[in-house]
Image (cartoon, rainbow, N blue to C red):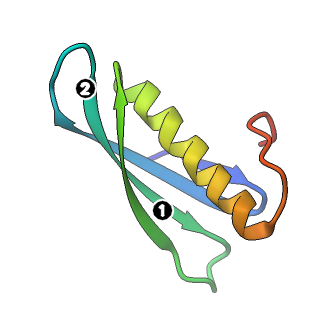
């Protein structure tokens, strides 16, 4: 599982197909956000509509980054790793 580092937080996102439909599919994104080994990991589940699993994962990761920025009270920048 791939881990994304963002503002000193580790984010993982697992994508599972929820339902097929036209013109797109529903995906469940299981997101984990942690900061260091001493802090507990927070888990979220997000439902998104996307054509592919990779697009759904990108949407899930972007939501996780926005959540971190809201908690830290900083402006969201999708280009910042």
Secondary element at image label 1:
strand
Q: Residue furthest left?
A: 20
Left or right: 36 in relation to 1 = right
Q: Residue furthest top?
A: 23
Seen from the viewer's position, the closer of residues 20 and 32 is 20
Position above or below: 26 against 51: below
Residue drawn 74% across and 58% down?
69
- Disc ID at residue 25: 2
Residue drawn 77% across and 43% down?
81
Left or right: 44 in relation to 17 = right
Residue drawn 65% across and 51% down?
65
Mark positioned earlier in the residue sequence (2 or 1) = 2
* Mark 2 crowdedness (10 Å alpha carbons): few <14, some 14-19, many ≥20: some
User: What residue is pinned by disc 1?
Assistant: 32
Q: Quadrant of residue 43?
A: bottom left
Residue drawn 69% across and 52% down?
5
Residue 18 drawn at (x, y percent): 19, 40
- Disc ID at residue 66: none
* Mark 1 crowdedness (10 Å alpha carbons): few <14, some 14-19, many ≥20: some
Callout in the foreground (2, 1) = 2
């Amino acid at each position: 599982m791939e881990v994304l580092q963002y503002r000193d937080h580790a984010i993982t996102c697992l994508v599972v197909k929820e339902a097929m439909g036209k013109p797109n599919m529903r995906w469940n994104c299981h997101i984990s956000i942690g900061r260091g080994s001493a802090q507990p990991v927070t888990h979220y589940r997000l439902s998104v509509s996307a054509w592919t699993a990779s697009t759904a994962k990108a949407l899930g990761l972007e939501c996780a980054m926005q959540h971190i920025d809201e908690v830290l009270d900083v402006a969201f920048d999708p280009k910042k790793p």
